[in-house]
Structure formats: structure tokens, C-alpha cells
Amino acid sequence: MSLKHGILGLLLQQERTGYDLKKDFNGSIAHLWNGSMSQIYRDLKTLEHEGAVVARIHEQQEKPDKKIYSITPLGRKMFQDWLEEFPKQTSPLKRDAFQLRLFFGAHLPEDKIIHELQRFQDEKRQYLAFIETMSQQLENRLGMDTSQRYLRFTLKRAQLSLKALMEWSQWCLDEMGV
């Protein structure tokens, strides 16, 4: 997935500002993809240049004007084409800086490895709490629509993956006698 396709998918739901898109990348799809404000605005500019989105100015009193983006028919087609072409490889290629360092852990003091594994666990625990909150909020909604069903699928995968990573890191700490 590219950030551009995430933007198009969100704009397919409703028009948004760049700031709104960033909130969505930090919230509803944070477990899938992320993007910085500068990346989002860069891709919005590219998508606008390509004719996939259009922007309108919303004037505000005593605040800077807002640029509100919406998807065009071309943008809908670009998104649909991307959506229908699932990747041949369903798991991404690995580029895990944490795992690579752990692989070479024999060259570090053991207390450093223990500290990093505990930090890893804390990070995953916090992220799991975020995912579980999102899942609970979703379950509390009445009349779940189709898109919420698929959001539920992705949240469940994130939840199970995080639990497995926490179990793995605890196994490593147990192996180290911690």
C-alpha cells in the first residue's frame, strides 16, 4: 500500500482536510499505515496534480482558511484499480531494525538486551491497549456496516500479532533468566 492509496480510500468515505487525514492516520488506520503531515501534504499535492483529488478553500473568520480535499472520478478509479490488485506476496519483506540488532546481541551487554526487550514489551502493551480501545469502541456501535466489519478484521489481526510479539519477548526474557 502506498500513502496515496490510503488518502484516496479515506477521501472516498468523505472529504477531508490534510489535518483531518493526519488524525485518521493516527487513529482509525494507525494499525495499518502511517504518514507524517509533510508526507500527507506532499501526496495530496501529487494527487491534485494527477487529477485524483480536488481542493476547495473554506474561508474562516479569525482563523486561516482550510483546504478541503475530495476525490474525483479519476481518483475513485485509481483507488479501485489499486484495491483490486492484491499483492502477490501477502507478507511484507522484512526490514526489522530491532530484530537485526537482537540477532547480533552477543556483541552487546546483556543488561542492554534486557532493557530493550522490556522496552519492546512496553511499546507493544501500549499499542495493544490502543487497539483494544478501538475494538471496544467499534463493538459498542449499533448497526455495524460493511466497512466496520473489515476494520474489525484488521483490528483483530493487529491484536493477535501484538499478543504474539509480547509472548515472544517474554519468552526471550525468560530464556535470559529475567
Image (spheres, rainbow, N blue to C red):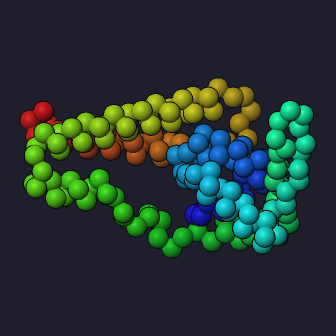
In the image, residue 52 lies at what x, y percent?
A: 79, 67
Q: Residue at x 62, y 50 (%)?
A: 37
Side of 99 relative to 34 (left or right):
left
Which of the two residues, 2 or 20, is positioned nearer the viewer here? 20
Vertical placement of 173 versus 82: above or below?
Answer: above
Q: Residue at x 72, y 43 (%)?
A: 20
Q: How many numbered tags mark residues here?
A: 0
In the image, residue 137 lies at what x, y percent?
A: 62, 29
Location of the C terminus by quadrant is top left
Q: Residue at x 36, y 63 (%)?
A: 95
Which of the two residues, 81 or 113, is positioned nearer the viewer here? 113
Side of 176 relative to 121 (left or right):
left
Q: Quadrant of residue 5?
A: bottom right
**Residue found at the very far front of the displayed protein:** 62
In the image, residue 12 lies at what x, y percent?
A: 78, 54
Q: Quadrant of residue 125?
A: top left
Do we see residue 145 in this rendering? yes
Vertical placement of 60 versus 56: above or below?
Answer: above
Side of 151 relative to 124 (left or right):
right
Do we see residue 149 in this rendering? no
Which of the two residues, 13 or 35, is positioned nearer the viewer here? 35
Vertical placement of 121 versus 147: above or below?
Answer: above
Vertical placement of 94 versus 113: above or below?
Answer: below
Location of the N terminus by quadrant is bottom right
In the image, residue 169 lies at what x, y percent?
A: 25, 42
Q: Quadrant of residue 40?
A: bottom right
